[in-house]
Amino acid sequence: MSHSQASLDFPLLARKPVQASFTGGNLTSDGGLLLLAQLDRKIGLTEHVAECLREWRMLERVKHSLLDLLRQRVYQIAAGYEDCNDADTLRSDPALKVAVGRGPTRAPDLASQPTLSRLEQTVSEAECAAMNEVLLWHFLQVPRKAPREVVLDMDASEDPTHGQQELALFNTHYGGYCYLPQFVFATVPGEGEEYLVSAELPETHTKEVDMLLATLERLAAGLRARWPGAKIVFRADAWYAVPEIYDWCEDHGVAYAIGLPTNAVLDRESRGWQRDAAAATSHSATGAARRFGEFPYQAKSWRRQRWVVVKAEQNPLGPNRRYVVTEGLRGTPRQRYQFYCRRGESENRIKEMKASIHFDRLSCMEFASNKVRLVFYCLAYVLLQRLRRVARGTGLCRAQIERLRLALIKIAARVKESQRRVQVEFCSHCPTQQMFRVLAGRLGAAPS
């Protein structure tokens, strides 16, 4: 693609003209992709995913291996380029080429947009499911002591659709046509990260109980194979309040805390705590008060009686009641309700993925291609999550993905290639260069 070489004049200095042009040479704005690529090589994420894909092309005509295509797509997303169209320009980027495994100047360019789009269109349903299982594999491979407990948070998120996208359905809750990707995050008490372990794109907006149970069964089996003695806890909001899930969890020794939609019976059973909260507001400086309690309850569709935790709150806006059905959890009603509320951290991770990875750009016409694209977005997020873990003990250990990207990936660099070496010269005034050196050392990049 040809670009105009004309200079741009900026009248910023009184005595000298300021001219700008795009003629600086072999530069990159994403020099930190080297750090991400080193991390990927260390944990083997994209290599493991590539093993799930079947080579369907004529090998004598192949220019880009499946591993190269996968790395190019995932690294682009991690760097903030969520569209395949960006590949038409980035395929020549020296840092991206080195990250994928090619020489920055003398090796052929990376794949173009049509080639990456064909990759998304040719992954089969079984291969997509195998790629999704790599998310759990990555969580299990993170170095840690055998945990006593693992919490699984399941939640869905809206992805608006446009045009004539296949299986785009109208959702009354969100008020528009959309997909509803389904995510599961795993948390080990004492760790600060909620790890993405499953990402699926259902074909319907109704509660597919069989699909939900299949996901739970797959994750629970993987966790118990790795840590046989670990306690598994399932946590979800009221959308997942179906008796089949309660029954499955109880039959398989999985504890749970699941929200319940309010109804007249629950309100009647919790009336005493509601009155106590209303009476306590007269002694509250903020005009608000809370009371927690529990009571046995059995809906007609339930096979047995279960305990329900209630939060009865009275505030200046009126009464606010919340109910959670629990099983296998210790503590007072307040403690169990607070445990349930911590599922909000997984919602924050979904918001983070939307804001920085843009997984809601599932814009393919074919539904199957969007399922593949969702997994690619999630792989990029998992890489950045793992980079955040590598940054533990630094100022970036709790940084949002966008902050992590600006600090460690969006670093200007000049890339030179000779017969003997490839030299990457980062910006001399990079404010995070010391932290970059620390993280590179942790990933095995030795100083020379």
Image (cartoon, rainbow, N blue to C red):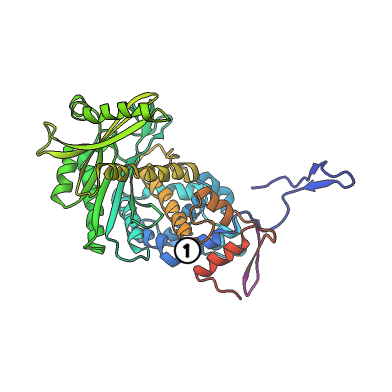
Nearer the observer, 347 or 53: 347
Does the magenta-highlighted stretch encompass residue 139?
Answer: no
- The percent position of residue 434, horizontal first and vertical second, equals 61, 64
Is most of the magenta stretch helix, strand or loop?
Answer: strand
Q: Which residue corresponds to the image point at 41% horizontal and 65% vertical from the top-left?
A: 43
Residue 172 in view, yes or no: no
Total numbered labels: 1
Q: Quadrant of the C terminus?
A: bottom right
Q: What residue type is labelled 1?
A: Leu
Circle 1: is it few (<14), some (14-19), or many (20+) Cα within 10 Å? many
Residue 351 in view, yes or no: yes
The quarter holding residue 337 reads: top left
**Which contiguous range is marked in magenta?**
413-422
Query: Is 429 displayed left or right of 272 in the figure?
Result: right
Quick one: which residue is furthest to the right in this view?
Answer: 15
Query: Is 427 displayed left or right of 438 in the figure?
Result: right
Q: Which residue corresponds to the image point at 45% horizontal and 66% vertical from the top-left?
A: 41
Q: Name the residue under label 1.
A: 39
- The percent position of residue 387, horizontal first and vertical second, equals 48, 59
